Image (spheres, grey):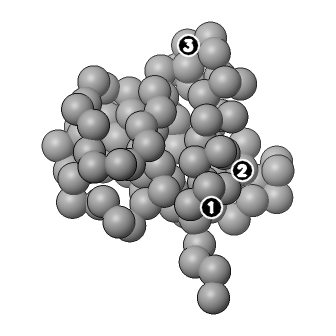
Amino acid sequence: MDRKRRVLVACGTAIATSTHVANRLEREFAARGLDIAITQCRVAEVPSHVGDVDVVVTTAPMAPVDSLPIVSGIPFLTGIGEDEALKQILEAVEGG
């Protein structure tokens, strides 16, 4: 049975920027008819999600965690490079 794909959105406090990015991703996924779960957390909490998510989208700097793909969420705040970031996220989710 195929499991539901999961995206983890992380920022410094798991409040403002992660919420903005998560909302933006929800709209993008819905527009493509994709049923992808999105969870938010603080960057410090990312290691506790290894194995539960397919990709991390972060608005704060963070060190690599195992082989978990990490994509910058900054393009969803600035509007610059959004298409490329979304492409990376979708590739990580599809590859999971």
**Left or right: 86 as drawn, with respect to 71:** right
Distance between the alpha carbons at the discs numbered 3 and 1: 23 Å
Q: Which residue is mark 2?
A: 29
Q: Which residue is mark 1?
A: 36
Q: Which residue is mark 3?
A: 78
Question: Quadrant where the C terminus lies?
Answer: bottom right
Circle 1 Cα neighbour tier, 10 Å, few/some/many (<14 / 14–19 / ≥20): some
Camera sees residue 4: yes
**Left or right: 34 as drawn, with respect to 95:** right
Distance between the alpha carbons at the discs numbered 3 and 2: 19 Å
> What is the quadrant of residue 2 in the picture?
bottom right
Residue pictured at 58% horizontal, 48% vertical: 92
Q: Compared to 28, does 38 lie above or below? A: below
Residue 38 drawn at (x, y percent) = 51, 56
Q: Compared to 14, does 61 lie above or below? A: above
Circle 3 Cα neighbour tier, 10 Å, few/some/many (<14 / 14–19 / ≥20): few
Of mark 1 and mark 2, the one earlier in the sequence is 2
**Mark in front: 3 vs 1:** 1
Outermost residue, left direction?
A: 44
Name the kind of residue labelled 2 in the image: Phe
> What is the quadrant of residue 56 in the picture?
top left
Residue pictured at 63% horizontal, 88% vertical: 1
Look at the numbered discs 1 and 2 and tell me whether their residues touch, using CB distance below 8 Å: yes
Name the kind of residue labelled 1 in the image: Ile
Q: Is 51 or 33 nearer to us in this picture? A: 51
Of mark 3 and mark 2, the one earlier in the sequence is 2
Look at the numbered discs 3 and 2 and tell me whether their residues touch, using CB distance below 8 Å: no
Residue pictured at 27% horizontal, 24% vertical: 61
Of mark 3 and mark 1, the one earlier in the sequence is 1
Q: Which mark is residue 11?
A: none
Name the kind of residue labelled 3 in the image: Thr
Distance between the alpha carbons at the discs numbered 1 and 2: 7 Å
